Image (cartoon, rainbow, N blue to C red):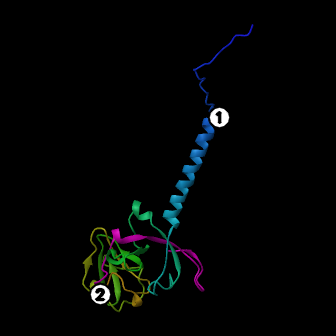
Amino acid sequence: MAKNRGLSFYRRKKKISSAHVREAFSWLFGIFTAIFIAVVLNVFLGVTTNVVGVSMEPTLYNGQRIYINSFLYLISSPKRGDVVVFLPNGNENAHYYVKRVVAVPGDSVLISGGILYVNGEESPWVTEKLADAGIAANECTVQNSEYFCIGDNPGNSEDSRSPNIGPVNEADMIGKVWFRAACGEQGMGFVK
């Protein structure tokens, strides 16, 4: 005789297999990895701009597309020789300025006889005679979190020598230029 089970109000618990758990974690790991890679690429490659003017020739040319590493200066400070992008005096309405760091906090800067002296020695970063010494006509010391920046074509550059620009505050820096796109005869490549 068959037993009549009748209605049962007890549910059987469904077992979750370890294969289902592994698959769920695999999907979550893939999603988080993709998001992480997207954020990292955006930080490193996401900031681009075009060079405005001839102040960085022959390193960079007017209209040339440059890629900016905006992450680097979150973990380290700019160094002498870095080509940086900044907003002059933090002015959000200004175009990005692209210049080379020639002096860091604590360095003394003097332009005498058209030659840039950093800590009493000729700077290797500016080889052209400087007709306009600007604020560096008298020796000055670069303050904390500030950087003295000059264009590679200093005869056609508005830079830290100018009283309306002055030393660049680190907070106003967008980042370091690390790559340039092709422009005319100059090929693309890493910026030194």
In the drawing, does residue 147 fall left or right of residue 9? left
Task: Write down the residue under mark 1.
Answer: 19
Q: Identify whether 98 is placed above or below 77.
A: below
Q: Is residue 143 left or right of residue 24?
A: left
Q: Which residues are magenta?
A: 163-192
The furthest residue to the right: 1
Mark 1 Cα-neighbour bin, 10 Å: few <14, some 14–19, many ≥20: few
Q: Is residue 75 magenta?
A: no
- Horizontal and vertical percent for residue 115? 35, 86
Which amino acid, mark 2?
Answer: Gly
Q: Amino acid at mark 1?
A: Ala
Find residue 186 and report its horizontal and vertical position in percent: 58, 83
Provide the residue designation for mark 2.
134
In the rendered picture of this protein, how many numbered marks are placed on residues?
2
The answer to whether 85 is drawn above or below residue 75 in the figure is below
Q: Which mark is residue 101?
A: none
Cα–Cα gap, marks 2 and 1: 71 Å
- Circles 2 and 1 in contact, beta carbons < 8 Å: no
Which residue lies at the image location 51% right of the left edge and 59% below the top edge? Answer: 40
Q: Residue at x 61, y 27 (%)?
A: 15
Which SS class for mark 1? helix
User: What element does badge 2 sit on?
Assistant: helix
- Residue 9, picture quadrant: top right
Q: Residue at x 37, y 78 (%)?
A: 93
Nearer to me, 41 or 58? 41
Discs 2/1, front: 1
